[in-house]
Amino acid sequence: MPNTNGDAIPLRPFGRHNVSISALGFGGHHLGDALDEGTAVRMVREAVDGGITFFDNCWEYHLGKSEAWMGAGLKGVRDRVFLMTKVCTHGRDKGLALRMLEESLRRLRTDHLDLWQVHGMGFENDPDLFIRKNGAAEALEQAKKEGKVRFVGFTGHKDPSVHLRMLATGFPFDSVQMPLNPFDSQFHSFEQRVLPELNRRDIAALGMKPICGHGDPVLKGILTAEEALRYAMSLPVTTTITGIDKPEILQQTLKVAQGFQPMPAPAMQSLRDRCRQSAADGRFELYKLSLKFDNPEARLAHRFPIDMQQAEVKEMLKMTENSGHPYPPAK
Amino acid sequence: MLGAAGSGAQGQSGGEVPKRPLGRTGLQVSALGIGGYHLGSAKSDAEANQIINEALDAGVNFFDNAWEYHQGLSEERLGRALKGKRDRAVVMTKVCTHGRDKNAAMRQIEESLTRLQTDHLDLWQIHEVIYENDPDLIFAPNGAAEALLQARQQGKVRFLGFTGHKDPSIHLKMLSHNFPFDTVQMPLNCLDATFRSFETNVLPEVNRRGMAALGMKSLGGSGELVREGAVVATMGLRYAMSLPVAVTISGIDSLDVLHQNLEVARNFHPLSAAEMQAVRDACRFEAADGHLELFKTTKKYDGDIGREMHGFPSAAELPV
């Protein structure tokens, strides 16, 4: 596999399946923050050439822009990657999920997904709403049967107990995504409570938010982005999904991932110790304690307040500005 | 412990608000208390003054407050209204160290006493114990717990407690220190009963220890339960007041709200166990994701001083 420094990004087995994916995954949300479509397309191509095979996305990221730009970037190289996107029912029904799937496939310019995950399981009744009759679980089964998706999973950043209740539904998930970083390891911890359970069940564990989402602890100088990413990639996960919104971030990230060697256990512990004090009240894990990282789709479906300052709320308003069009767009 | 019909002087529109023992303090407090935050939200000093005086005349004697409410306005309004009537009231306020040390707490009590125009508090509580490391910070050497004991020893406060609206497990962590708290304040409403429940997890433990339980957020903090149709206001308040608590603290920012709540509180009769279960069941769906108990699930009710002390974005930067 071609890359810049001669070492490949390691591939790891995807759970119990005979498929391997790159130990680093390209996060879809930040792709929509790129300067423009041309930049996004170039970054996707460079990532593929650099050995990244796992691409993350989501129906609701930037109201479809993230999927559209990734689809453009993957044109001609779709078969070299393992493509994931997420469905955003947030408790709503199967019919809606299947309509979202068609939109995602069209934007991503493909006839199938390698992985389709239920997005944002975080509110306490999400597991009940997922598994209910005519809920999103039925959409996952149907899409798999129709060959539109190969594997299915779920994601969430809020609360390990919600993840455990999702697992307790008994639904045959192939993957589970969660925030994993040195702060998480000691506060409402997915690393302690969810990751071992996934490993035990041979479900592919996908890490995200290695630098806590927007990198606040890096900006505060508590640790470097490289340390945080290396920590997350050293956990027993299949891949670590990281946000890449600029070409220089891509190069930094590739440098860590190519020829990656896991951190020794004592180094991981010393990083945890360094983060202990500021981990204790969750100040750098706002996704666990506030609505900051909850998409307006999720908030509205659960009737939580939206935040007019949130980028995606502004995008929603812009979409309908002076157009006479309602949000969500009529089918 | 459940309320009985009030005794004593009859008000113009019914009986007095009943009194209940405040744990083992020997004090008797009205089953309805006036929340201090909303006194600062009332549209004028005059209206706040009238709320307090009408409440006193109806037999309400429990007044809540906090050093940080409205930069002191809430305490000032209560102090002015109680001038000459201080002995008719059980005055509580809260100290807002949010992890800072004993000296910060002792400076705050002097300010609170000045604003409240009194030489002592009946109850001084640690405010907003909502961050997971708050119990560690409060009980650290030279922490707020030491200030509570010192203020009591100096006769500046009679009784001690703490409050918080976030997570029952944080309340239990506070109790595990076996500090001699006289009171514990917590959100109690018909949705709390089935979601991250203080009613289930904390209230029995507080009563077992003989401490007085103080309920708050009977309608969700800003009337969310009523606005979204989970329960009507009078039933929401009746539910909270029917729990084994000493007092239910209610935010009252207008005379209209006071009159509505006094209707419920005068000659208060608790709901039966079956009636309470029916209310809980009717709210179960609305309770299930916490979207009406935003103080548990979002940052909305977390004050700016606490956020700053804990390194969180301000309310302007992160409203929810």
Image (tube, grey):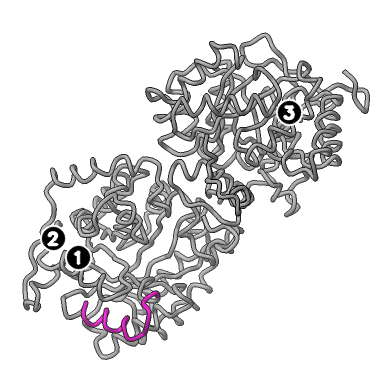
Q: How many marks?
A: 3
Identify the disc placed on residue B268. none
Q: Residue at x 55, y 14 (%)?
A: A144
- Identify residue type, mark 1: Ala
> Which residue is label 2 attached to?
B3
> Which residue is label 3 attached to?
A71
Q: Residue at x 65, y 36 (%)?
A: A64
- Identify residue type, mark 3: Gly
- Which one is nearer the viewer's eye here, A96 or B178? A96
Q: Tell whether B198 sits left or right of A23.
A: left
Badges 2 and 1, same chain: yes
Q: Residue at x 6, y 77 (%)?
A: B10
The residue marked by circle 1 belongs to what chain?
A: B
Mark nearer the viewer, 1 or 3: 3
A237 lies above or below B320: above
Distance Cα–Cα, label 1 vs label 3? 63 Å
> Which residue is label 1 attached to?
B31
Badges 1 and 3, same chain: no
